[in-house]
Structures are given as C-alpha cells and as structure tokens.
Amino acid sequence: MYASELPGEQIETIEFPDNQKCIDMLESRTEQSFFKIMEEELVMRSRDDNVLLAKLDDRLKHFTNYKKSKFGGSKQFSISHYAMDVTYDIDGFLMKNMDQSSDAVTQTIELLDVLGTQ
C-alpha cells in the first residue's frame, strides 16, 4: 500500500546505507576497479598473488573502502562493506577466483608459443 492509501497512518521510513562507493571500487567501468585488476592478473602466466596485492594496494588507494594492511609484509587487505570491514588473505586468492576456461586458453597459448605458431 502507498502512504496516500492509509489516511491518518504513519509509515515508518527504512533507511538503507549507501554502498555505492564500495560497488564502484569493486566494479567501476571508468576507473581501475578490484575486478579489473584481478582479471588483469589472472590472464598473466605468472598469476602471482603478491603482484596482485601490490597492484591492489597501489591502484585502489584512493578508494576509502579499500584498506591496505598496516603491517609491512602482510599478505592481507580489507574491504569496508556496509556492515563492517572484511579482511582477505592474498595467498591462493587468484587460484580460488580463476575461471577454468581462462586456464584452458592460457594452456593453448603456451602450446602455440612452444610450437612457434603466432
């Protein structure tokens, strides 16, 4: 029902937190985003979690929702979601998020390199 259909009734307004900044950091199309950086690293042959972390720390530092670890040498980062900060460990991050089809494409490219085909 709409408020106009309930004469004299008070309708409680529900406030929702605005999570747009976090969404932009994760999947922005106009800037470097978390998913674009991760995808970039997934297509690399090395698929190095530490390189991914360095790229995330460097390219997402202007987003307030991304938090680099305060401890040097740490392999963690945090993302501030609407409810709380969630900390992620970078070890194995790329392998856990790798699409099996991109692995097949990479293997095919490596095979073509071995055969000398361009």
Image (spheres, rainbow, N blue to C red):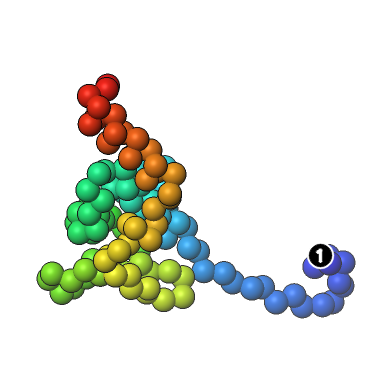
Whether residue 27 sits left or right of residue 37 in the image: it is right
| Residue at point 34%, 58% (across, down) | 95
Residue 29 percent location from the top left of the image:
42, 42
Q: Quadrant of the C terminus?
A: top left
Label 1's element?
loop
Query: Can residue 21 be seen?
Result: no
- What is the residue that sits farthest to the front in this orientation? 115
Q: At label 1, which amino acid type do we have?
A: Tyr
| Relative side of 97 to 77, left or right | right
Q: Which of the 4 image quarters holds residue 65?
A: bottom left
Residue at far left of view: 72
Q: Which residue is mark 1?
A: 2
Q: Relative to 87, does residue 64 appear above or below in the rendering? A: above
Q: Nearer the viewer, residue 7 or 42?
A: 42
Query: Residue 94 placed where, x, y %?
Result: 32, 57
Q: Is residue 78 above or below residue 116?
A: below
Q: Position of residue 40 (x, y in %)?
A: 31, 44
Q: Nearer the viewer, residue 37 or 5?
A: 37
Residue 63 shows in the view: yes
Residue that appears at 37% across and 73% down? 86
Q: What residue do we see at 84% from left, 67% from top?
A: 1
The one of 94 and 27 positioned closer to us in this rendering: 94
